[in-house]
């Protein structure tokens, strides 16, 4: 889900392989700054997450986070049965 | 409302021919946005499609909550970037020319007195800044503007499906359809993934000027064989302290010639976005287009 959203934030340009690997591995060190999105990119990212999960992650919510794993945790918590 | 459904509705509304009734469209569309993300999808599409006057008309609507608050945040952002968009919007009307291409014209001024700008968007389907904000900077009595977008994850090199099979054919299609010989002057401009192709288009149609802003040639693309017209002036613009874009600018210059134009005080790829936030965009844009 994260990789699809990252792709959307990059406007269809696939992320570089090391970034894909870090996301796939669930790296705890990968920061949101490492993704290098601008404000439009974050809007597209959040739209994609909502489309895939139904969870309303917004750029405002993301502003309070620092690491990519925090987004994963946020989604997981809300999707737990 | 699902975002896909919103996209379909938007396409239907925005691609309709003739005079638009933006007020009704916006209120209805925005009221259907269940979440902030759906509203963001709507606002991104509108700010990259509508004319400055259409955007300004939204500001005058009497909207109800939560659309009212969401719209205010969105429009205040645009107002902060370009206050004239609301004070005295340019008088462009828009018309779909072909899939992915919108033509903006103020019909009150004859084409022979105006310049034509062919603008090629980057992957984000805008000109580093929202198209409506970009248009507001260009005097509609002096410019007609064609904004071309490729579909996401496609390349201009492959043309546009149903319109042209490759890029030279696309440029020629534009040349014919817009009858560019009617204009006093023709300029091409492209940002990011559109920059290289703006330069190439200038070659194909022998425009007076071709401008690449943060442009680059796509990877895995063979260098086009081009005969560069002697009278075409190329400007290759990039952030002065953005090493990757400097390399890319050199590659474009090697192929087409032209003048490198580094922009001082910009380290990012998004040259126009940074200049706009610094309040320097108008002066720079007027200089590269003059």
Image (cartoon, helix red, strand yellow):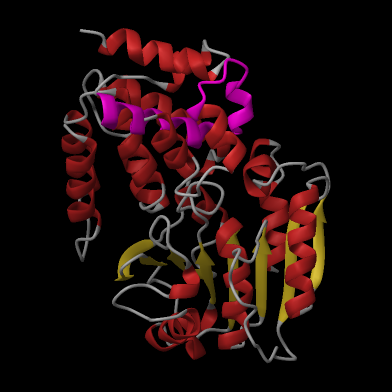
* Residue at the (47%, 35%) spot, across then down: A6
* Residue at the (48%, 29%) spot, across then down: A24
- Stretch in magenta: A24-53
Q: Is residue A49 magenta?
A: yes
**B131 lies above or below A67:** below
Relative horizontal placement of residue B221, taking residue A13 as reference (left or right)? right
Q: Is residue B243 magenta?
A: no
Which quadrant: the N terminus of chain B?
A: top left
Residue A66 point in image, percent of width and height: 58, 14
Relative horizontal placement of residue B215, taking residue B156 as reference (left or right)? right
Figure quadrant of residue A19: top right
Residue B50 point in image, percent of width and height: 35, 51
Residue B211 point in image, percent of width and height: 66, 68
**B14 lies above or below B210:** above
Residue A52 point in image, percent of width and height: 28, 30
Count of number-bearing discs = 0
* Residue at the (52%, 10%) spot, across then down: A64
Q: Main secondary structure of the magenta part?
A: helix
Figure quadrant of residue B241: top right
* Residue lying furthest front: A25
Give the camera-side residue of B133 and B60: B133
């Amino acid at each position: 889900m994260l990789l699809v959203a990252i792709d959307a934030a990059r406007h269809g340009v696939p992320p570089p392989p090391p970034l894909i690997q870090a996301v796939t591995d669930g790296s705890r060190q990968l920061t949101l700054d490492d993704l290098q999105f601008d404000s439009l990119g974050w809007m597209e990212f959040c739209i994609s997450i909502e489309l895939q999960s139904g969870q309303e992650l917004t750029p405002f919510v993301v502003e309070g986070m620092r690491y990519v794993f925090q987004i994963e945790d946020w989604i997981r918590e809300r999707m737990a049965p | 409302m699902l975002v896909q459904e919103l996209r379909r509705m938007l396409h239907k509304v925005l691609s309709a021919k003739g005079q638009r009734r933006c007020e009704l469209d916006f209120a209805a569309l925005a009221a259907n946005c269940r979440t902030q993300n759906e509203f963001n999808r709507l606002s991104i599409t509108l700010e990259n499609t509508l004319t400055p006057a259409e955007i300004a008309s939204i500001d005058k609507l009497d909207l109800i909550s939560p659309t009212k608050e969401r719209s205010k945040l969105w429009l205040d952002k645009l107002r902060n970037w370009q206050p004239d968009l609301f004070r005295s919007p340019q008088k462009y009307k828009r018309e779909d020319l072909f899939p992915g291409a919108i033509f903006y014209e103020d019909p009150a001024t004859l084409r022979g007195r105006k310049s034509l700008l062919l603008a090629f968007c980057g992957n984000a389907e805008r000109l580093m800044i929202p198209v409506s904000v970009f248009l507001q900077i260009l005097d509609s009595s002096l410019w007609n503007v064609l904004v071309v977008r490729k579909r996401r994850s496609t390349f201009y090199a492959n043309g546009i499906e149903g319109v042209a099979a490759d890029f030279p054919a696309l440029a020629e299609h534009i040349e014919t359809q817009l009858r560019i010989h009617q204009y006093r002057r023709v300029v091409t401009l492209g940002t990011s993934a559109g920059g290289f192709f703006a330069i190439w288009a200038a070659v194909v149609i022998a425009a007076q000027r071709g401008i690449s802003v943060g442009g680059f040639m796509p990877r895995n693309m063979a260098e086009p064989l081009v005969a560069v017209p002697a009278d075409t002036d190329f400007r290759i613009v990039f952030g002065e302290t953005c090493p990757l874009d400097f390399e890319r600018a050199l590659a474009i210059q090697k192929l087409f010639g032209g003048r490198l134009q580094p922009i001082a005080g910009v380290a990012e790829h998004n040259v126009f976005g940074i200049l706009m936030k610094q309040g320097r965009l108008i002066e720079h844009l007027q200089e590269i287009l003059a």
